[in-house]
Structures are given as C-alpha cells and as structure tokens.
Image: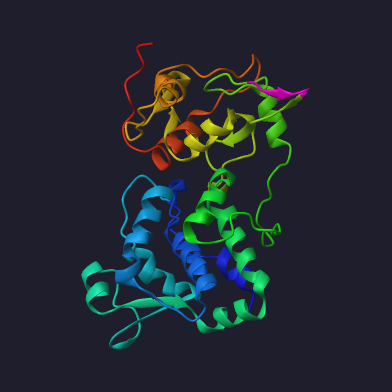
C-alpha cells in the first residue's frame, strides 16, 4: 500500500478553487494524536472543540462543522469510525455523533505501517501541508496538532503532481524592488535581503501559478497575516484589513490597522500587478470578515 499516494488522493470539494481542507486538518490532527498515543482513539465529543478551532483558524472563511470530515474521511481508506453500537459512522449529524459515542482512528493497516516505519508519519504530515497550506503556516499548524514543527525530510510529490518553480521568489522580489508591498520594509544584510518573502496570492496548493501576477513581496509579518486572512487586496490594489483583527498596542496599529486603504507599493513599471482573478480568490477563500474603513492617517 502506498500511503502517500492515498493521502495525496483525498477526495475533496474543489469546484471553482474552493478551499476544503477539512479532511487534511482532521488527518493532521489524527497523526499528531497517534504520535502521542498510537493505541488511542478520538471520541468525537472529546475532540469536537479542538477540530472546530482548527477549522476556524485554518479553514475557509465560511463556518463548517467538524462532523463533516469526521464522517466523510471514512471513504478515503485511512480512517474508521465506530459507535457504542459497533463499527460504522452514524453520519454527519452532530447530535448523533455525540449521543452514539462515535470515535474515530486511523485504519489498522495505516497504524501498522506507521509503527513499522517511524519516518512515514513525518512524510505524510509534510505531504498534507504541501498540498493544502502555504509554507508560512506549516510551523504553527504542526504545533497546533502536536507534530514536530519542522519535518526533517522533504517529500517528493506523487507522480503527475506539479512542482514548484524555484525561480518564483527571485522574480517576485525583483518585481517589487526588494521591499514589502504593504509596508515598504527593505532590510538587508550586506547585499542579501532579510525578512522578505514571496507570497502567493492564490495559494500554490489551490492551483495558484508561480508567476509574478500571482505574487507579492512581503515582509515576514505581513506574509503571515496575508495568509491568515487578516490582510487582503481590494479594488485599486489597495490594502484591506479584516475587522476581525484586534490589537491595542501602537505597533499593532502602526503595522496592521493603519494599512487599511493604502495602495500597494509596486510592482515596478513593466512588471505585471496582481491579477484580478487571484485577488478575488484570496478574498473569497482566505480573507476573514469585512474590511475595516480606510485609515484616516
């Protein structure tokens, strides 16, 4: 059994580039719990709150119940559910999952494979991260589910999957003249830029191309906030700041809320700005809530 191929082939709702990371999040959570207790199972009523937080923080803006992946992951050959009545999931009804004592865990064959090959767990986790989330979120997501925050070995994507273009970072940073498109930060150590990253607007994991018109040069802080849905790009290529973001300190105001309504810095003349289709995808699938009014400063 090629477990990496099976994980890469999780069936998901993908119409129109819609994000549906519900099954990958549950599987990452299950891998983290397996790492702690390889013989344990996850009773729905006990993990519902944890799964809900993961979906709220790393899922799409629209709310989804954790009952959905808890039931539907059973169709992918990696997860099983039983109730107090015996094997089999009672469905996606939250009340029935709670009342029936529904509990899930990795299927026996996968548990055995993970015990035989201790490196398999890290490879599976890294594959799930690469296929469904941007690199800026990998470390904190691993920590959130109880996995090592930095998997030690890179994972080759299964045959037929597209590979990242390693030129993307340099092309984007050059187009934005090595400064953050949101705040203008342009730090260097000697001639080497430091703290600047190439962000995908439409995530690579969701068919975002490795092209300049799908990229932004951002400082590390604003890259993380962009991928978390705190920041976005509106009409006229102006910065959007989510009303969900709060911060009472002066740095929070100066570095985040004061950005609302500001025009992007760059790209340089002749370079392609962020395409409207990619901006729209990010607003639908990543940006959280309504934007704040433009800053008066």
Q: Is residue 31 above or below residue 89?
A: above
Residue lying furthest right: 191
Where residue 252 appears, as percent x and y from the top left, is: 42, 27
The residue shown at (42%, 78%) is 41
Q: Is residue 84 above or below residue 178?
A: below
The residue shown at (49%, 80%) is 107
Q: Is residue 47 magenta?
A: no
Image quadrant where one finds the C terminus: top left
The residue shown at (50%, 63%) is 28
Applied colour scheme? rainbow
Q: Is residue 235 above or below residue 231?
A: above
Segment tinted magenta in the rendering: 186-191
Asked whether 140 or 275 is in front, the reply is 140
Count the marks. Answer: 0
Magenta highlight: main SS = loop
Where residue 110 appears, as percent x and y from the top left, is: 56, 78
Image-based side of 212 in relation to 37, left or right: right
Where residue 52 appears, as percent x and y from the top left, is: 34, 57
Residue lying furthest bottom: 86
Where residue 152 appears, as percent x and y from the top left, is: 69, 58
Residue lying furthest top: 297
Image quadrant where one finds the N terminus: bottom right
Asked whether 145 or 131 is in front, the reply is 145
Image-based side of 238 in relation to 117, left or right: left
The answer to which quarter of the image holds residue 272 is top right
The residue shown at (36%, 54%) is 53
Image-based side of 134 in relation to 98, left or right: right
């Amino acid at each position: 059994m090629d477990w990496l191929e099976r994980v890469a082939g999780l069936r998901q709702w993908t119409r129109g580039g819609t994000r549906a990371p519900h099954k990958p999040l549950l599987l990452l959570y299950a891998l983290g719990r397996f790492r702690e207790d390889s013989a344990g199972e996850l009773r729905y009523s006990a993990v519902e709150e944890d799964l809900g937080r993961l979906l709220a923080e790393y899922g799409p803006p629209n709310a989804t119940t954790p009952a959905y992946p808890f039931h539907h992951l059973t169709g992918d050959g990696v997860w099983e559910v039983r109730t107090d009545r015996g094997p089999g999931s009672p469905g996606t009804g939250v009340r029935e999952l709670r009342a029936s004592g529904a509990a899930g865990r990795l299927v026996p064959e996968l548990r055995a494979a993970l015990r035989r090959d201790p490196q398999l767990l890290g490879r599976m986790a890294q594959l799930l991260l690469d296929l469904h989330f941007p690199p800026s979120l990998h470390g904190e997501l691993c920590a959130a589910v109880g996995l090592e925050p930095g998997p030690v070995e890179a994972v080759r994507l299964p045959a037929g999957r597209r590979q990242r273009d390693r030129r993307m970072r340099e092309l984007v940073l050059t187009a934005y003249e090595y400064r953050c498109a949101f705040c203008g930060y342009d730090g260097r150590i000697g001639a080497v830029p430091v703290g600047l990253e190439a962000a995908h607007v439409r995530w690579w994991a969701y068919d975002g191309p490795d092209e300049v018109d799908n990229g932004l040069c951002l400082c590390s802080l604003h890259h993380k906030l962009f991928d978390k849905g705190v920041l976005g790009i509106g009409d006229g290529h102006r910065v959007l700041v989510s009303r969900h973001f709060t911060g009472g300190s002066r740095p929070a105001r100066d570095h985040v809320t004061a950005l609302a309504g500001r025009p992007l810095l760059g790209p340089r003349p002749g370079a392609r700005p962020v395409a409207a289709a990619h901006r729209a995808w990010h607003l639908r699938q990543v940006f959280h809530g309504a934007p704040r009014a433009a800053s008066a400063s």
